[in-house]
């Protein structure tokens, strides 16, 4: 025989235990969601910084390539050494500092780009002067290159 009083006591204990379980599950869920949101915001921040570094590296490569192409002696005369970058990066600024060299010693070149948020990226290198060349030499090969013939030879070898 089941006593009605005992049954009520068991149901009340079960209800209280379920409430505690739900509260603990809610706390665990809240901690998990907070962790997830924190990781997501960090990942987005790191992605933005990575994109910015890639753009800075590309701009620095372009600037140093121009110094190499024009020659460190003539670069300051031909190009601007500071100012905004070309489109689509007009919100980025650049600066080039070229230290003079003596004779055939290399020039010390420091290129700096500044991101819209104020972050600065630098790259320093040594660039040899152009010696004994015309200002704009003709860089065509001495004899014409038969690209089709080379391609056919490569196909025949395979």
Image: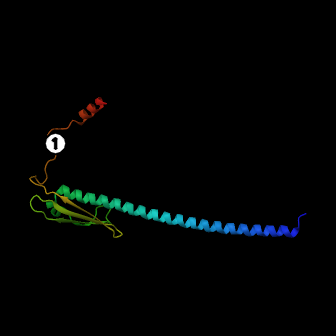
In the depicted structure, whether residue 153 falls above or below residue 96: above
- Tell me: 51 left or right of 31: left
- Identify the residue at image location x=36%, y=62%: 52
- Tell me: 129 left or right of 14: left
Q: How is the image coloured?
A: rainbow
**Residue pushed farthest right?**
1
- Identify the residue at image location x=76%, y=66%: 14
- Identify the residue at image location x=27%, y=57%: 61
- Tell me: 147 left or right of 42: left
Q: Residues within 10 Å of mark 1 (few under 14, many from 20)?
A: few
Q: Quadrant of residue 30?
A: bottom right
Q: Quadrant of residue 144?
A: top left
Rendered-image quadrant of the N terminus: bottom right
Residue 145: image location, x then y, percent: 20, 38
Residue 133: image location, x then y, percent: 10, 52
- Identify the residue at image location x=84%, y=67%: 7
Determine if residue 88 is in view.
no
Q: Secondary structure at mark 1?
A: loop
Determine if residue 107 is in view.
yes
Q: How many marks?
A: 1
In the depicted structure, whether residue 154 falls above or below residue 119: above
**Residue pushed farthest front?**
1
Rendered-image quadrant of the C terminus: top left
User: What residue sits right under mark 1 in the picture?
Assistant: 141
**Residue pushed farthest top?**
156
Residue 157: image location, x then y, percent: 29, 30
Residue 100: image location, x then y, percent: 13, 65
Residue in front for this viewpoint, 51 or 3:
3
């Amino acid at each position: 025989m089941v006593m009605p009083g005992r049954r009520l006591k068991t149901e009340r204990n079960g209800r209280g235990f379920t409430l505690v379980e739900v509260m603990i599950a809610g706390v665990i869920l809240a901690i998990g969601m907070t962790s997830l949101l924190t990781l997501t915001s960090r990942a987005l921040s790191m992605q933005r910084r990575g994109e910015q570094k890639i753009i800075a590296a590309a701009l620095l490569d372009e600037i140093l390539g121009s110094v190499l192409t024009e020659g460190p002696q003539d670069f300051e005369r031909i190009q601007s050494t500071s100012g905004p970058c070309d489109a689509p990066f007009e919100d980025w600024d650049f600066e080039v500092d070229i230290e003079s060299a003596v004779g055939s010693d290399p020039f010390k070149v420091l290129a700096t780009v500044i991101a819209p948020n104020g972050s600065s990226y630098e790259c320093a290198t040594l660039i040899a002067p152009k010696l004994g060349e015309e200002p704009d030499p003709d860089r065509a090969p001495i004899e014409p290159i038969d690209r089709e013939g080379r391609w056919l030879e490569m196909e025949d070898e395979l």
